[in-house]
Amino acid sequence: MALFIYGTATHTGKNFFTAEDRRAFFLRGYPANVWVVGNNEKGALWLANHNGVEKTKSEAQALVTADVNAAQAAWDALSEEARAGTNRPTEVTLP
Amino acid sequence: MTEYSGIKGTRVRYLSSDVTLNDAAKGQIWYNSTTGKNKSFVEFKAWSSGANMPVAKRALWSAGTQTAALGFGGYGPGVFNTTEEYYGFNWATGGAMNTPGYHLSGAGTQTAAVAFARGTPTPVKGPLTEEYNGSSWSEQPDMGSARYNATGWGTQTAAVCAGGGPGQPTMLLTEEYDGSSWTNSSNYPTKIYGLGSAGTQTAGLGCGGYAPDQANQGGTYPGNTTLVCHYDGSSWTTSTPLITVATGLMASGTQTNALQIGGVGTINAETSCSQYDGIGWTSTPSMANNRQTFGASMTSAQAAVAFGGPGTVTSGNTNATEEYNSTYSKVTTTAAWSAGGNYPGPVYSAGSSTNSPSTASVAFGGYVSGSKSSATNEYNGSSWTSANAMSDTFTSGAYGGTQTAAFGAGGYANPPSRTAATEEYDGTNWTGGGALSVAASQNVGFGTSTAGVVYGGEGSPDPAIKTSTQEYDGSSWTTVNTMPVGASGHGTGFGTQTAGVRNSGTAPTPNPSTWDGGPAGFVNITLLYDGTNWTSGAFSNWGGRNSTGFGIQTSGVSCGGEGAPGTTPLVRTEQYDGTSWSDVATLPRTNNSYSAGFGASSGSGAVVGGTGPTSNSTDEFTGQVSADAASNLTTS
């Protein structure tokens, strides 16, 4: 059985996820509103309750990569000052 | 019919709920009728093994705490001048004493100790005094009397030496050290040497020892005593004796809460220990090793460490280390992040009130939706509300304070150039403040708009900025003592002007002289500021530039950051308790670098924004909390 569920959900702000959620199951946000949650009842319910759209891992990875690539292009266009000592956004590999 | 409890056993309180777990509840046992459980709130005490010392020695002295102890001098055979530092998990070698010594005494901490009253190869006993600064020993004025096998306690600047000899009349003498000179005080109640001690210069404790005038105990060492005395800074009074005689013992704690450790009994070195509450002694668990003339931490009766010493007068020395812990059952609530209200736009490189509760905080400036911003937004724990803007844009500068006393200093203003400007926020309006000594970016701050600190950063060009520290009084900045290690790259800073913390960021490694700006080493160092000087603190587990944090020196958080280009941003969340860091939770997203943090303590706080890609998220932190808990009693 897969360890994670992949999906997209719009971050609605306060209590979009709670401390109890984080204690109860794996939950981590990625670029492009991609969320990776634990493949269990609580994780699945969280995604469903937040109008999430389940994706395959490869679909989710493609969304993340596209968003990171866009961020990289934007970073490349920044002035040295605007980069402000930040790293160029790095490729993200979903777990 | 006779009740069993009347002839055997004692009654247990019958309660519908657990008692309140406060000091009054300590030691109690009760029956909880709701849960059907026998419950207790009792202390668990035990010795456990620690890392072996790098050398086996006896007749050494020691200082410090269980997690930062110091052992120095001693006898092997051969008289040692070596110093060993214990960090709670391993030993390191410290600087060598200028003069070897055994059966010596001392006081202080791992980074500020003093050694005195030592035996030396020639002469046998000496008045030498040396101070240790964490790396090297320096000679100080001699004591008034030459002696060894005395005892010592207190701090480097307020120490006491009592007893010692052998011979007349030093066994009676008490001398006080103030960090620069010795003065005589009143005599110990009897001639004595090889006693243990703990406490402070004005509330000291002497216990055990060999008293030749009381050589009536029998056994191999008839002068070994149970004598216990209190010192108030000027005179000695006797108190409740030890449970058993002991010489060459150690003590750890205070005058009213001390642990007696080992020592020679009537025949041999003992493993036995006991605890003192200022009135009487109770037995506590024994060590695994017999010990006499050994080393121990001296500050706590609840957390101690013992090391070195021989088991018998004629046996070989041991390098075994043992740790003592006395704790009540705890229940720990794990730390976690939750989602807060979204910021008005994606933001990074903003400033914030790092020392304010997350329900009343402010964030300002930064790059918002891709543009340099002067915007100010206040957070109430749920949502952000726009407030009066700064007079200029603010990015990559130092910041800190509270919602009603925040400041931003340095960074980049508009047009693009580093600035020395300071702006102060009073909860409603921004006003211009005094200028930094030089324009700087990537600097870090803590404190408030009336008592602030800014350190490190980058100038153009001005390498000296990186070690600089400036204090703000609400109107002007004053350059104060520099840091021992330069800082840049927007690390984590939090705390107050008299109790601040620097963590993470970048620093000049490996060669400070060639560091002229930009990324150098991505470091996990911690420096602590006391309003005058910077001292080293414990390393955090992780570190990198563009990290953030919040809180105060004894209860803070450092989180996020990024390492070398191309590496995955850090998702660490580390809590600091004033002594050590604990990695307690992972951030909920990978783009937290260059976020702005705020929180009054490690108990709760928040971070907003971040880059890689840029985010408008606010993440709220609930810290790890450990609280006393009642234990279930079982019959098996």
Image (cartoon, coloured by chain):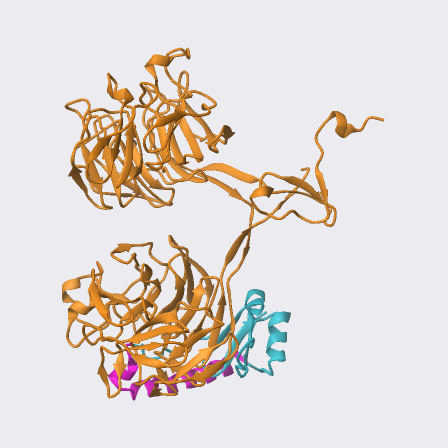
Chain colours: A cyan, B orange
Q: Quadrant of the N terminus of chain B?
A: top right
Q: Residue B468, percent across and down? A: 20, 65
Q: Is residue B358 left or right of residue B475?
A: right
Residue B163 colored in magenta in the image: no
Residue A59 colored in magenta in the image: yes
Q: Residue B590, percent across and down? A: 43, 74
Q: Is residue B14 left or right of residue B230?
A: right
A60 or B420: nearer the viewer? B420
Q: In terms of image quadrants, where is residue B417?
A: bottom left
Q: Quadrant of the C terminus of chain B?
A: top right
Q: Residue B342, percent across and down? A: 49, 81
Q: Which residues are magenta?
A: A56-85
Q: In terms of image quadrants, where is residue B203?
A: top left
Numbered disc total: 0
Q: Residue B325, percent across and down? A: 47, 40
Q: Is residue B59 visible?
A: no
B80 or B61: nearer the viewer? B61
**Taking B228 as reference, is B537 above or below it?**
below
**Taking B22 as reference, is B186 above or below it?**
above
Q: Is residue B133 left or right of residue A69?
A: left
Extreme residue in the right direction: B1
Q: Main secondary structure of the magenta part?
A: helix
The residue located at (60%, 72%) in the rendering is A43
Q: In terms of image quadrants, where is residue B473?
A: bottom left
**Taking A84 as reference, is B627 above or below it?**
above
Q: Is residue B574 visible?
A: yes
B265 or A76: nearer the viewer? B265
The residue located at (29%, 87%) in the rendering is A78
The residue located at (31%, 85%) in the rendering is B391
